[in-house]
Amino acid sequence: AAAVASKAAFFIMRFSILLLAAISLTNVEGFSVGGTFLTAEQKAALEATAAAIATPGKGITACDEGPGTIGLRFEAVGVENTEENRRKYRQMLFEAEGCENYLSAAILDPETLYQKSDTSGKLFPEVLTEKGIVPGIKPHLKIYTLPGTDGDTVMQGLDSLNVRCKEYYEGGARFAKWRSPLVIDMSKGCPTNLAIKANMQDLARYALICQSEGLMPIVEPDVSLTGTHTLEEAIDVNIRVQSELFKAMVDHGVYMAGSTLKPNIINAGRDCPTSYSVEEIAAANIFVLEQSFPVAMKGANYLSGGQSLEDAAARLSAINKNKGNGPWNLSFSWSQAIQLPVLALCKGKGELQLEEMSKLYVDELKIASAAAKGEWDGKAGDGDHSI
């Protein structure tokens, strides 16, 4: 009896210690892990933005290319790269009739944030907000190659980020998106552990700074689809990358419910000789999410990463058809997949064909929306990997 009493006393003491530890982690507003520097109102605002972007059936139009990048796309179809042409093109993306039925958000370049519509005279963030589309911003700068890593890179721009975020918020932006690019090269051992850690730490710090200035952070660990790696190797690398990212975010105290993920489609490298079906690719993406994607985060918006609209839509639709009980809204944040066919309408014309472009753009958004609901059925073979 004495032994039983002693054992009971031990467990009671152990339970008390655990209870005290749990109490120490809480405050009047709940657990203190993540976002302790934010007020309840600030958390609610960030979470509301994340929820709005995760509206089922809607996604993000990614039009945050800088003047140089969009200039290359213009040049390819014979359109002059002027600020006015860039403004007119972005206005079409924001004011196309019915686009708000398929868009929850738009990512802008800093130049676009301060441009106006010649229809209403209003700044583009106000135009978007009035249509129920959340305006966001790209705050990162240029890529830098890490010495000694055989080609791994990091994104620059953390210096003075808080100042720029404050200005962007005052300019009407309500979220930001930071891209950290990585490349799989199994022969070189890339991405190295150093590159993964450095990039994911940067993403976490960026997210923390954004939240402190009122911007809901979208974190984009962009693992390129270039290369010869297999689907299985892509799964392994992406799990390493995403688990490192979410740990870094938690370690930094990021409020996870007030943030969003923009991942790449997990797939074999473009030059991988092994064929995979769209169903196998979808299963790989769900598997990666299930390993570490926090349920506190409301959704993920996949980037297109050089995929055609047909392949991107088929894969996103297959992912949604097979996500099972996954709690997340899985949608799109596409640039090239939507914009390149739209810009192709200008070839041989010498100027923007805004009316035609607007109609095709909305038709493409309908496809993207259907894919975000798991309702898009393309042609046989769409979304498969084969060379």
Image: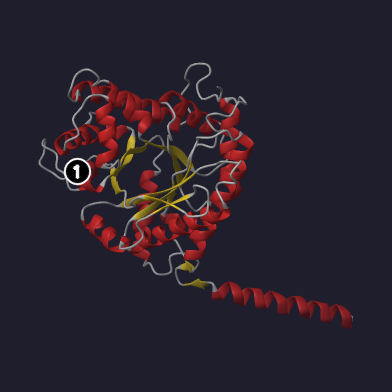
Q: Nearer the viewer, residue 205 or 21?
A: 205
Could you tell me which residue is drawn at 30 percent across and 49 percent down? 137
Residue 261 location (% of width, % of height)? 45, 47
Q: Can you say which quadrant of the picture contains the N terminus?
A: bottom right
**Whether residue 87 is situated above or below residue 297 in the rendered picture:** above
**Whether residue 282 is situated above or below residue 127 in the rendered picture:** above
Total numbered circles: 1
Could you tell me which residue is drawn at 38 percent across and 53 percent down? 217
Q: Amino acid at mark 1?
A: Phe
Q: Quadrant of residue 67?
A: top left
Residue 234 location (% of width, % of height)? 58, 39
Asked if residue 225 can be seen in this view, the reply is yes
Q: Quadrant of residue 247?
A: bottom right
Mark 1 is surrounded, within 10 Å at the Cα level, by few (under 14), some (14 to 19) or many (20 or more) other residues, namely many
**Whether residue 350 is situated above or below residue 61 in the rendered picture:** above
Q: Nearer the viewer, residue 357 or 297?
A: 357
Residue 240 location (% of width, % of height)? 59, 50
Is residue 211 toward the left or the right of residue 240 in the image?
left
Q: Can you say which quadrant of the picture contains the C terminus?
A: top right
Could you tell me which residue is drawn at 48 percent across and 55 percent down? 147
Outermost residue toward the bottom in this view: 2
**Residue underneath mark 1:** 124
Task: Give the structural element (helix, strand or loop) at label 1.
Answer: helix
Residue 8 location (% of width, % of height)? 79, 77
Is residue 311 toward the left or the right of residue 88 in the image?
right
| Display colour scheme | secondary structure
Asked if residue 324 can be seen in this view, the reply is no
Q: Nearer the viewer, residue 230 or 300?
A: 230
